[in-house]
Image (tube, rainbow, N blue to C red):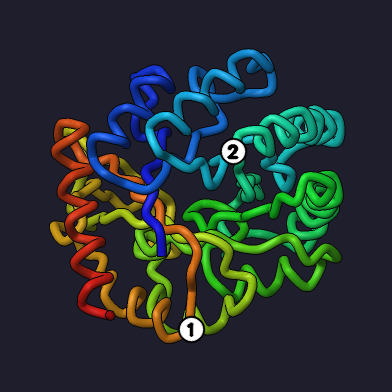
Amino acid sequence: MKIAMFSGALIEYSIHEALQIAQRIGVDGLEIAGNEPHFSPTTSSLRIKEIKRLADNLGLAIPAIGGYAGRFSELGDADCEREFENIRRMLPKAAELGASLFRVQTGGPNGFLAQEYHYQKSAHFIDRCAEEAQQYNIRIALEIHNQSIIETTDDCSRLLKLIKRDNVGFIHDAGNMYITDTDYGRDSVLRLGSRLFHVHVKDELRIPEAGDPGTFTNLTRHGQEAFVQCRLGDGGVDHQPLFAALEETGYDGWVTLECFAPYPIEERFRHDFKEVRSLLASKS
């Protein structure tokens, strides 16, 4: 397994600064957020070449684009077409950066509120994205995310039954699944099987109420709940069963650090990088 950082947690920095921070931390790559100021449909070819050159010079891979486009299940047809066009424009740029994975947002509502038409609409446009991505040897990744139609592995199975393309899979995110209050350990890895394309790691903790830095609220099956973003090991997410299962199943893809805890950037990423290396060492 190789370890990357997510540039979305560095969005207040330029993409050049984000790459340099990743190099100082010592990770293998940077997963680039599909948002300005890092990467978007309007990013010029010249800038793409500049980003690629800097990443190569720093010895960093760009394994994935963490896109924010999509949300097909909750949008009208015209907006869905605009989102698809944005993804279509970004795919060749992602390929030029060397990314083999592109995240597409499925959209909401929460899985426990979603109706069949939400899954059907999302599947239709995701298939179109996957067909477009295939010509660039890029796989489409859908993140298991709280407040989306895929909050659990059951939700993933429900959506996958409607998808025709085999270059569509999932991003496992134990932090998101902790918020949802669903299994994120061994069984979740086994259920995703060969469609587990990528892994995000971060820690969260349920708290009585939000308000302090790093806190937020989410609608879950338990109602409105409050959480605080934590460094790995400081919250309520036990990643050990996940990493044991990844080793058991022979997962050899990327693990992306996605820490938004209220600590200085380099401090929190150095901490999480050390924790992940420890988890990997304990399984070797």
Helix, strand or loop status at disc 1 = loop
- In-image side of 212 versus 71 (left or right): left
Q: Residue at x 50, y 55 (%)?
A: 145
Give the image location of residue 90, x and y in percent.
71, 30
Q: Which residue is mark 2?
A: 67
Above or below, 161 against 43 in this view is below
Give the image location of residue 18, x and y in percent.
36, 27
Q: Which residue is mark 1?
A: 249
Q: Quadrant of the N terminus?
A: bottom left
Residue 121 visible (yes or no): no
Question: Mark 1 to mark 2: distance in Å?
Answer: 27 Å
Return the residue nearer the eye: 160 or 248: 248
Q: Residue at x 65, y 35 (%)?
A: 94
Give the image location of residue 60, x and y in percent.
42, 39
Q: Earlier in the sequence, mark 1 or mark 2?
A: 2
Residue 44, labelled with which disc?
none
Classify 10 Å Cα crowding around label 2: few (below 14), some (14-19), many (20 and above). Answer: many
The type of residue carrying mark 2 is Gly
Q: Residue at x 18, y 33 (%)?
A: 213
**Total number of numbered labels?**
2
The type of residue carrying mark 1 is Thr
The quarter of the picture where residue 197 lies is bottom right
Above or below, 198 against 20 in this view is below
Give the image location of residue 9, x and y in percent.
35, 34
Return the residue nearer the eye: 45 or 223: 45
Residue 72 visible (yes or no): yes
Helix, strand or loop status at disc 2 = strand
Q: Residue at x 53, y 69 (%)?
A: 152
The quarter of the picture where residue 16 lies is top left
User: Residue furthest toward the front?
Assistant: 57
